[in-house]
Image (cartoon, coloured by chain):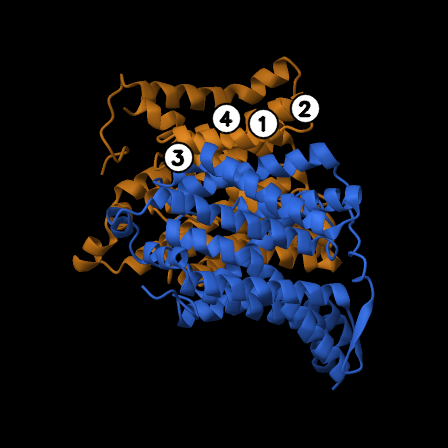
Chain colours: A blue, B orange
Amino acid sequence: VNWELLLVQTLNGVQYGLLLFLLAAGLTLVLGIMNFVNLAHASLYMLGAYLGAAAFAASGSFLLAGAAAVLGTLLIGLIVERTTLLAFYARDHLDQVLATFGLILFFNELVRVIWGPQPVYMRAPDGFTGAVSVFGALYPSYRFLVIIAGLVVAAALYFIIHHTRIGMLIRAGASNARMVSVLGVNIRLLNTLLFGLGAALAGLSGLMAAPILAVQPGMGDNVLIVVLVAIVIGGIGSVRGAFFGALIVGVVDTFGRTMLPLLLRQMAERSVADAAGPALASMLIFLFMAVVLAFRPQGLFPARK
Amino acid sequence: MTFFPEPLSWRSPRVAVVAALIAVLALLPAVTAAISEPFYVTLVARILIFALAACGLNLVLGYGGLVSFGHALYVGLGAYVVGLLSFHGVTSGWVHLAVTLAASALVAWVTGLICLRTSGLAFIMITLAFGQMFYFLGVSLKQYGGDDGLQIAARSDFAPLSIQSNTGLYYVSLALLLATLYLSWRLVHARFGRVLRGAKSNARRMRVLGFPLLRYQVTAYVISGCICAVAGLLLANLTKFTSPAYMFWTVSGDLIVMVLLGGIATVIGPLVGAAVYVIMETVLAGYTQHWMLILGPIIVLIARFARRGLYGFLLR
């Protein structure tokens, strides 16, 4: 066994998982508490990446890029929520899915008009372009930054949700929104806050992903589906579930892509393995989700109701 | 047993609309041949094929109340059956059809059983995930073109019928669509359809009445998958091409828009919706290359205001 490879792949899996978590956290809160399916979360992630990359290219400062990505998506998120999505809160899921699907098409085309169809590349910020040595294995330091950012956000969310008044209201809203409203809490304001928080997190994850992935139109769509898988595995509406679900998906997907073709090559003929390996690897997280659902339809870490 | 499953008033506007629609569709190839604009046959064949897929989706989405966001899977499955069998030298359309039906029924049965363990939000996400799973499977099939798709050398051979000409394919698609529409009309008014609709409006009550809902819903899911797969078979024959793009999740979204636009839970709605949507796409795409910039907001407006759809509007 190649321990170095194993270590690097584990780190890659955790890094991918935490990136997914940044997206999943906002999405699952909106899903669980407002009972609203926001597919346009994928667009906010994409916009975060574009805004961040543009600000970074213009200023050279990663902090400014972060501010542009987070505040920009926050603002866009709030505008979209107020102008368009507010009317869909009381509608059924079908209408919500359709409306946010329309928004995705719109934003994908919008960035194509503004930034062109070619991918935009963003380099890692100064000081994070190199690699650090972990137990003898070299690992890009920027990816460590992503891991740290993910863990910081997870800890902050945990603190907010479990130890602040706002968090208490969020939890209360999750179990009975109408009751919270009757007790005199402005649930609409709370909803907007939540939506804004989710949008900002989506922007942050877009920025963090920008130096690793190509920034291009539609970049959020595929990630969105993986995030939905993570949420379903973790349990809809639970941030804890989103955290573990995202980590599991990140690690399973990363290992599936690197290890499965190698493993198959030892068991089957090379031509068969080369054909089946990538196919199986790309299906792995979905098969994993199917197995989880077959035994626990509510997810592994469901929200306590 | 009568021919029509529900009483019809011959003077109601919808009978007139449906009769006019069928007449136009039946005469269209002759008209386009007369004015030598053969492009329209291909365009309307495309409409018919998407109408067939939307009709399949409508069965679970409209009548069953099951929001599937992954029905492009079956369209792609049908297209890939044609592509893969032709690639390996099997050209008989009847074999293509049989394999398409068997494969889609199997996939729909297995994924349906898993998806239907959940409901509501989770159901939407899981059907979406399964759709993307097959999309990625198609992308990873490098020996069959992967991302770029697979050219199909010749159309399926449905001897003694022929779909080698666009007109032939058009009439086969039209016949299949009309037959499917009629059968789905019968189906939703039969006991099966009533149970399905009952499950949509009050699942708990239906269970208490003793109906094994899962069995009905899985059956509807399988039928719906098979209809979409046949649409995929026709689509691959129309374009002589199959690609993972047919399974991409936005295609599932397009199908939902067609159902809603035409009139959810109406028999003719999917045809009306598909026609308006495909024409709208074509017109917008001819107008600007950034047509999605216009289509996106239109979809938002459809979701916001088209509660009963264009055809549903007539039913009032």
Please name the residue shown 46% across and 50% down the image: B225
Element class at badge 2 = loop
* Rendered location of residue B258, percent (x, y): 47, 34
* Rendered location of residue A52, percent (x, y): 70, 46
Label 1: which residue?
B294
Please name the residue shown 26% across and 60% down the image: B212
The label nearer to you, 3 versus 4, is: 3
* Rendered location of residue A122, percent (x, y): 78, 50
The label nearer to you, 2 versus 3, is: 3
Q: Count residues near mark 4 (Cα–Cα under 10 Å), then give few for <14, some for 14-19, many for 20+.
A: some
Q: Is residue A12 left or right of residue A43?
A: right
Q: CA distance from mark 3 to mark 4?
A: 25 Å
Pointer 1 or 4: first along the chain: 4
Instruction: Say which chain tag 2 marks.
Output: B
Please state which amino acid type lies under the numbered disc 4: Val
Instruction: Say which chain tag 3 marks.
Output: A
Of A182 and A30, which appears nearest the observer?
A: A182
